Amino acid sequence: MKFSTITTAIVSSAIAVSSTPIHKREIGGVLLCTGANATGTCNYSVYALDTCHQLAAPFHHNTSTFAPDGEAFECFPRIGDCGSICTSPTGCTFGSVDFDYANKFNLGAIQWNTLISSFDCSRKTTTASS
C-alpha cells in the first residue's frame, strides 16, 4: 500500500512538471563585471540586438569581464560612445566577442578593460559550406 501512495505522488508530480511551460533563455544576455573572472561589481542583462548600448558607471572604461551567453550571437565592444564616429584606421573595436571568446573573463589580457565605452550585439551569420 505504501508503494502505491509513493507511485501516485511521483506520477502526480511528473504531470504537474510536464504541464509547466519551458521558457527558453532570451538571446542577448551579457555579463559585465568591473573585475576579471566575474569579480567586482557585476551586472547581467539581456540587451536588444542591433542597438548600441552605452556603458554607464561603473562599467564605462572599467569592464574586465564581458561575457555573452551561449546563444548564436556576438557583440562588438567599442572605444567610442554610442553615436560617436570612428576615425581610427584600425577600427574602434577589437572584433567580435561571443561565448567562445578566450578573453571574455579578462579583457585586461588585451588591454581593453579601460577602453570599452559601448557595445552592440547581433545574431551570428552562418555561411553554408560548399
Image (spheres, helix red, strand yellow):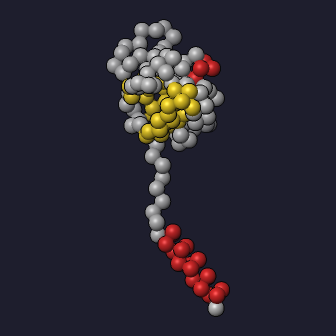
Task: Give the residue drawn at x 49%, y 16%.
Answer: 115
Displayed quadrant of residue 53: top left
Residue farthest left in this picture: 83
Disc tally is 0
Task: Give the residue drawn at x 48%, y 59%.
Answer: 22
Residue 38 visible? The answer is yes
Task: Give the residue drawn at x 47%, y 35%.
Answer: 43
Q: Nearer the viewer, residue 63 or 102?
A: 63
Residue 104 visible? The answer is no
Give percent across and percent down for residue 97.
Answer: 55, 29
The quarter in which the C terminus is drawn is: top right
Asked if 16 appears above or below 80 in the picture, the reply is: below
Displayed quadrant of residue 55: top left
Give percent across and percent down for residue 40.
Answer: 54, 30
Give percent across and percent down for residue 123.
Answer: 47, 37
Residue farthest front in this picture: 40
Q: Is residue 69 left or right of residue 51?
A: right
Give percent across and percent down for residue 19.
Answer: 47, 69
Q: Nearer the viewer, residue 46 or 88?
A: 46
Asked if 61 appears above or below 66 in the picture, the reply is: above
Asked if 93 appears above or below 99 in the picture, the reply is: above
Task: Give the residue drawn at x 61%, y 82%.
Answer: 6
The quarter in which the N terminus is drawn is: bottom right
